[in-house]
Image: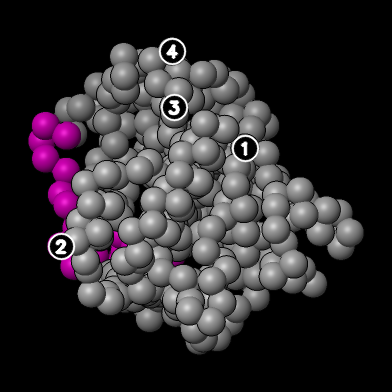
């Protein structure tokens, strides 16, 4: 990108750097340098990291629980293993300095007041435990299912789970009941535009409203066919009206962060009905990220209701 993040001290510095280098980056709804760095990395850097390689020295703003490097406090002692643009492993030294931990959580709380939904808050019990003393600690995580998906070049993680969850008779009934609540497609519509049952499909954001009972949630109206819309409650905010997004309707089986699976059902979230879920890269099996919605490029001409799996394979 030509951007030296060591020279970036604020969000305005970051935006100025984008403008100077004429880089286009969707930053609507992103709050804090950590989120901006992450968006830049995923858009311009990660797709070009063929590797395999270890990515080290993340900016401290990106992981609030990671320890700073002694020789460069603006970076954290961390590394990530990537191959062919796929994240396979993440590791870092745990932060054991109680004052630094408090300061960084206070920074997170400041971001939360600006609207950052994923921000952490100060945990006084945890700070007190650190004050008693914690030895140097480090950890790393790798999902064997995701590694197998990578080694076998499988399009989704569901294809390699050894014992995938089976839909029970009760689940089938729920899926059938929920399906009956969908608006039918018109008889003259293109069959390619009919939602694919049981698969993550392409939808388009028509409207975004604030949740009446939760500041951290949004009510999103998505269109999945020329005549069918759904209301979905979502905790992420990296999308806007007009974006194409992956949608899992009730009855769809999706991966979970712990390597398992879950069947999407129609539920009430803080008193508002949610008819499905907007999907992250994790649910699509393209990365381990489950904190943002995976946006689909309009340049590839996504078709409403089309299987996202087929769309990604086409790309």
Give the Cα distance between marks 4 and 1. Answer: 19 Å
Left or right side of 210 for 256: left
Give the Cα distance between marks 4 and 3. Answer: 9 Å
Q: Which residue is mark 2?
A: 163
Q: Which residue is mark 3?
A: 217
In this view, the residue in front, 83 or 303, is: 83
Under circle 4, the secondary element is loop
Q: Which residue is mark 1?
A: 29
Under circle 1, the secondary element is loop
Labels 4 and 1: the sequence-earlier one: 1
- Magenta residue span: 155-171
Residue 97 horizontal/vertical position (percent): 35, 64
Give the Cα distance between marks 1 and 3. Answer: 13 Å
> Could you tell me which residue is drawn at 70 percent across and 52 percent down?
10
| Mark carried by residue 189 | none
Residue 18 is a magenta residue: no
Q: Is residue 65 above or below residue 11?
A: below
Nearer to us of marks 1 and 2 is: 1
Left or right side of 3 for 179: left
Q: Is residue 217 above or below residue 95?
A: above
Labels 1 and 2: the sequence-earlier one: 1
Nearer to us of marks 2 and 4 is: 4
Residue 208 horizontal/vertical position (percent): 57, 23
Give the Cα distance between marks 2 and 4. Answer: 40 Å
Labels 4 and 3: the sequence-earlier one: 4
Residue 304 shows in the view:
no
């Amino acid at each position: 990108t030509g951007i030296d993040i060591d020279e970036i001290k604020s969000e305005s510095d970051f935006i100025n750097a984008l403008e100077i280098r004429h880089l286009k980056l969707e930053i609507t709804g992103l709050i804090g340098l950590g989120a901006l760095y992450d968006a830049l990395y995923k858009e311009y850097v990660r797709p070009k990291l063929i590797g395999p390689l270890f990515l080290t020295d993340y900016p401290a703003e990106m992981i609030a629980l990671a320890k700073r490097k002694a020789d460069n406090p603006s970076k954290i002692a961390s590394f990530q293993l990537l191959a062919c643009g796929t994240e396979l492993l993440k590791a870092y030294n745990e932060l054991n300095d109680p004052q630094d931990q408090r300061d960084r959580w206070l920074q997170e709380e400041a971001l939360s007041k600006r609207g950052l939904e994923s921000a952490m808050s100060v945990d006084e019990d945890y700070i007190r435990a650190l004050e008693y003393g914690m030895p140097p600690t480090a950890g790393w995580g790798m999902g064997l299912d995701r590694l197998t998906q990578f080694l076998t070049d499988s399009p989704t993680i569901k294809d390699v789970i050894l014992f995938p969850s089976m839909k029970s008779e009760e689940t089938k009934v729920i899926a059938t009941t929920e399906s009956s609540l969908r608006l039918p497609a018109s008889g003259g519509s293109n069959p390619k535009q009919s939602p694919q049952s049981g698969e993550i499909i392409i939808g388009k954001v028509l409207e975004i409203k604030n949740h009446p009972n939760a500041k951290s949630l949004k009510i999103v109206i998505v269109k999945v066919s020329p005549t069918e819309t759904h209301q979905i409650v979502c905790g992420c905010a990296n999308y806007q009206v007009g974006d194409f997004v992956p949608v899992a309707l009730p009855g769809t089986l999706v991966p979970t962060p712990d390597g398992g699976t879950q069947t999407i059902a129609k539920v009430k979230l803080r008193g508002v009905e949610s008819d499905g879920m907007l999907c992250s890269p994790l649910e699509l099996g393209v990365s381990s990220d489950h904190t943002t919605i995976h946006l689909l490029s309009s340049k590839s001409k996504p078709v409403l209701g089309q299987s996202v799996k087929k769309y990604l394979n086409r790309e």
